[in-house]
Amino acid sequence: MKPVDRDLLILLHEDRYTEQQIQSAVRQISEMLTLIETMDYLCAVMEVANCNKSKVTNKRTVLEKAISRKAHKPFEFIIHKN
């Protein structure tokens, strides 16, 4: 798997952790994000609410279209189920 180039902001007390511990924590967080940033996971935890059609759905095709749009449709919301 190709490593993801991302910016992470992690606030730590420098005097409490060694450089190796910090690098290990960053690597672990990056690995966790890589595991959950998949479309299968997003389909399980998100849904699309379309107020124009009075529909709420978590179908993969609808969610993929809603996420990938450059300009979002009015009154269409991507909602986290939590």
Image: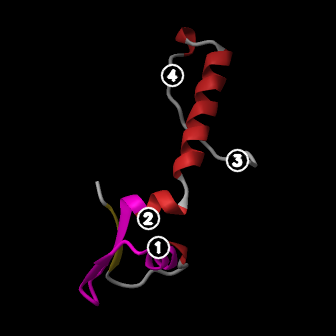
Q: Any mark on residue 21, and which? A: none
Residue 5, which numbered label? Answer: 3
Badge 1 or badge 3: first in the primary sequence: 3
Kindly check if marks 4 and 3 are in contact, taking CB atoms under 8 A apart as contact: no
Q: Amino acid at mark 4?
A: Leu
Residue 19 is left or right of residue 79, and the answer is right
Crowding at dot 4, Cα within 10 Å, few <14 / some 14-19 / many 20+, comes out as: few
**Which of marks 1 and 4 precedes in the sequence?**
4
Amino acid at circle 2: Cys
Residue at coordinates 64% horizontally, 32% vertically from top-left? Answer: 27
Q: Residue furthest bottom?
A: 53
Q: Which residues are magenta?
A: 44-66
Q: Tag 2: Cα neighbours inside 10 Å, few (<14), some, or many (≥20)?
A: some
Numbered label attached to residue 60: 1
Would you call the spot at circle 3 few (<14 residues within 10 Å), some (14-19), or many (20 or more)? few
Q: Find the distance from the CA under tag 4 to the CA under tag 3.
A: 21 Å
At which x and y percent is residue 55? 27, 83
Q: Which of disc 2 and disc 4 is earlier in sequence?
A: 4
Contact, mark 2 vs mark 1 (Cβ under 8 Å):
yes
Q: Which residue is mark 4?
A: 12
Please state which amino acid type lies under the numbered disc 1.
Arg
